[in-house]
Image (cartoon, grey):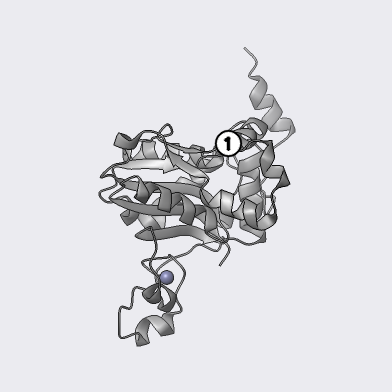
Amino acid sequence: MVNLSKIVDFLFPKRCLFCKAQVDSELVCSACILKLPLIQSPFCQRCGQPLPQSLFKKSKVNPAVCPACRAKRFPFSQSRSVMLYDEDTSRLILRLKYGDQTHLASVFADLVFLNHVDIFRDVDVIIPVPLGFMRLMKRQYNQSALIASVLSNRTKIPLNTRAFVRKHFNKSQGGLSFQARHENVKEAFFVKVLEDIEDKVVLLVDDVMASGATLLSASRALKKAGAKEVRLITIARTV
Ligand SMILES: [Zn+2]
Ligand SMILES: [Zn+2]
C-alpha cells in the first residue's frame, strides 16, 4: 500500500522553524533548541529569575534568593520558567497556541526536566491554569493543560483539571472601567472541588508569565482553598 504521508514528506520536507534545516517530524532542530534562552542555574529559588553570577557569589544572606524576594511574600513557594520570552520563544509558544503543534508540548516538557526536575519533588497534583470558557471555545484547547498533561504522564503525578476553574464573566464585565476589570480578574479563580486541593502540594502550569498577576491570583485562590504549597512552572517569562 502507498504510504501517503511518506509521499507528502518527500514532496514537502519538514523544515526547522528557525534555521530551515530539514527535520524528521519535530518543529525545531536540536541545534536550535539549544540556542533558545534557557534559564539555568543560578536562578532565584523563589521567583525563578536568572541571577547574575556576581551577585550569586557576593550575596551573604541567602545566595539562592534574589534581593526582591527577600523583601516580598508570595502565595507560591517556588516559581520556575524554562526560558526567557523573546522573539524566538514567542514564535514557538504561538505555534503551540494557534498552530496546533501539540508535539511542541513534549519538547517543552523535555526542557522542564533538563533544568527544573527538582520542582516535582513531593508534588501531589499538577494543575493547568484554566482558560475562561469563551477563550477555550475559541482556541479549542488549553495549551497549559496540554503541557500539564505531558508533565503528568512523564512523572506519574496526577493531573487535575476539574478542581480549579475560572469564573465566567457575564456581559456586565464590558461596562466596567479598566480598574474594575482588573479587580474582577483578581478574583477570577475558584476552587470547585476542595478535597482535591486541601493539604496538597500543587504544581500550577502555565505557558507564559508576563506581569505575573494571573499566576499570583491563581496561587492565592489555591492557598485560600487550603493548598499546603503552591509551586509554579511556566515555559517562558518576560523578565
Ligand atoms: Zn534549526
Ligand atoms: Zn526572586
Residue 38 seen by the camera: yes
The residue at the point 50 percent across, 62 percent down is: 38
Q: Give the percent coordinates (x, y) of residue 82.
A: 48, 57
Q: Give the percent coordinates (x, y) of residue 34.
A: 53, 59
Q: Residue furthest top?
A: 1
Residue topped by disc 1: 168
* Direction from residue 211 to residue 196 in the image, left or right: left
Q: Give the percent coordinates (x, y) of residue 151.
A: 40, 42
Position of the N terminus by quadrant:
top right
Position of the C terminus by quadrant:
bottom right
Q: In the rendered structure, which amino acid carries the disc numbered 1?
A: His
Examine the rendered structure and indicate whether residue 183 appears above or below residue 61: above
Q: Give the percent coordinates (x, y) of residue 216.
A: 47, 56
Which one is nearer the viewer's eye here, 106 or 34?
106
* Direction from residue 199 to residue 106 in the image, left or right: right
Examine the rendered structure and indicate whether residue 151 appears above or below residue 182: above
The residue at the point 30 percent across, 46 percent down is: 226
Examine the rendered structure and indicate whether residue 152 appears above or below residue 38: above
Which one is nearer the viewer's eye here, 82 or 128?
128
